[in-house]
Image (tube, rainbow, N blue to C red):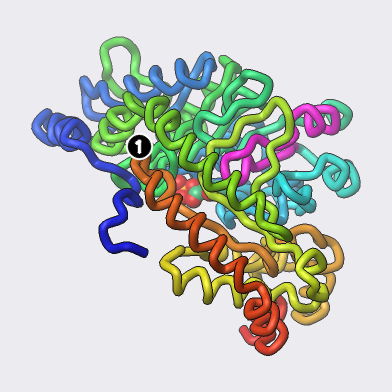
Amino acid sequence: MPRDTPGGTWPVVTPEDEQAVLRVLRSGRLNAASPGETEVPALERAWAEATGTRHCVAVASGTAALHLALRGCGIGPGDEVIVPALTMNATAHAVYATGATPVFADVEPGTYTLDPEAVAAVAGPRTAALLPVHLHGLPADMPGLRRVADRLGVPLVEDAAQAHGALLDGRRAGALGRAGCFSLHPHKNLPSCGEGGLITTDDDGLYEQLVRLRNFGERAPESTGTRTYISHQAALNARMAPVAAAFTRSQLARFDEDARRREPGIRELVGRLDRLPGLRGPRIPAGRTHAWHILRLMPEPDELDLKPEHRTGLRAALHRMLRAEGVPVSQYQVAPLPAHPAFRPAGLSDSAALDQVAERFPVTTAVVDGSLCLQRRHLDPAAGPLLRHYADAFEKTWRHLDLVRRMAVARPAPGWREMLRKG
Ligand SMILES: Cc1ncc(COP(=O)(O)O)c(C=O)c1O
């Protein structure tokens, strides 16, 4: 890659962001419970408005957002919550933290989001909520999932950690279920300068619950701003720091503009990659928009004259060749979630458990073994020239497909099962 190719920094930190942080440091109101603190409520109002929801509650992280949203919906011990097999581990940890059990369902090919048919197949009498993830920034099939949720009589809670600003039928992620949960991890499309999370909801009762659950079960201070320190239910401290809230609100002021500026470069890259034979880019069904948090690229062995058993070798060959050209492709999720030791089916040997996961989650298995991702650098609105370089490098690699094939066959790479068997 030419050394002077501009772009590729995320998050971009401007003098305005620095001033926002300084403003808090100089105010002395360093914690969300400080009397007179205004940064956290201002971010909450701005994000409720941005998502078109009645309420927003800021919390300490995206994981805390998921945990509290589930608790607020009454999820607890004895319940089951259906989550996708392909997602970040926080989705399942949040379910465990309520005392409930995550039940995994496979994702759809191409969109990588929860498959409503797979959900219907694993739902049972203990199913108490569905927790779809808008993975990589694409809203899940919420109409299909809503039909299943309504039949079961359970709420839909969105894991929108990666999907700030994405739309489904004109409505923003976060406004598509009973509650929407966002992460403000610094690598996310809407970053904080540390940790943070946001929960959106139209439900007044849930909102009241969430305000209590993030602060030791205490009610919100009355207009006097004075805390009573009386706990009305058991809960931990999940408050967001004002410094982080001020930084995020400063980022939010240019969020739509940043999204508009990055769109043409990403569309050009995705369009050029889509024209390469045997390579699948993100599939965006009608009525949905993509926040482009992660770009997943899926090479198809059979379209490249390779056998299915060469899937991992093909991924490894492309990884080597593209990295040599300066394209930082990586794996996002190195194993299906139900195969992680923390989440494996009980009562089976490790080896049998891994085989069972591969059999039950064929789409996730193929995606984890075969695909490569681009993360973070493309979020810089000035990354256009860098993304053009990425597209050039992919096209160059595709001009050498004979070499790619030879490498894929000669150097079989371990898949997730082999990797986990080794420990
Ligand atoms: C899909 C998904 N869910 C949940 C989380 C957890 O968010 P956080 O890291 O802010 O706790 C993340 C982010 O890391 C995520 O990508």
Q: Nearer the viewer, residue 404 or 399?
A: 399
Res 357 quadrant in image: bottom right
Q: Amino acid at mark 1?
A: Met
Please determine whether, in this image, residue 246 is positioned above or below residue 64.
Answer: above
Residue 342: x %, y % from top left: 64, 67
Q: Nearer the viewer, residue 97 or 378?
A: 378
Q: Is residue 56 left or right of residue 19?
A: right
> From which residue to which does the magenta span run?
129-148
Looking at the rendered structure, the secondary structure element under dot 1 is loop
Residue 411: x %, y % from top left: 65, 87
Q: Is residue 18 left or right of residue 39?
A: left
Identify which residue is drawn at 63% across, 35% down: 158
Q: Which residue is mark 1?
A: 240
Q: Residue furthest front?
A: 399
Residue 18 visible in the displayed image: yes
Image quarter hosting the C terminus = bottom right
- Give yes or no for residue 150 being in the magenta stretch: no
Q: Is residue 127 left or right of residue 342?
A: right
Q: Nearer the viewer, residue 135 or 225?
A: 135
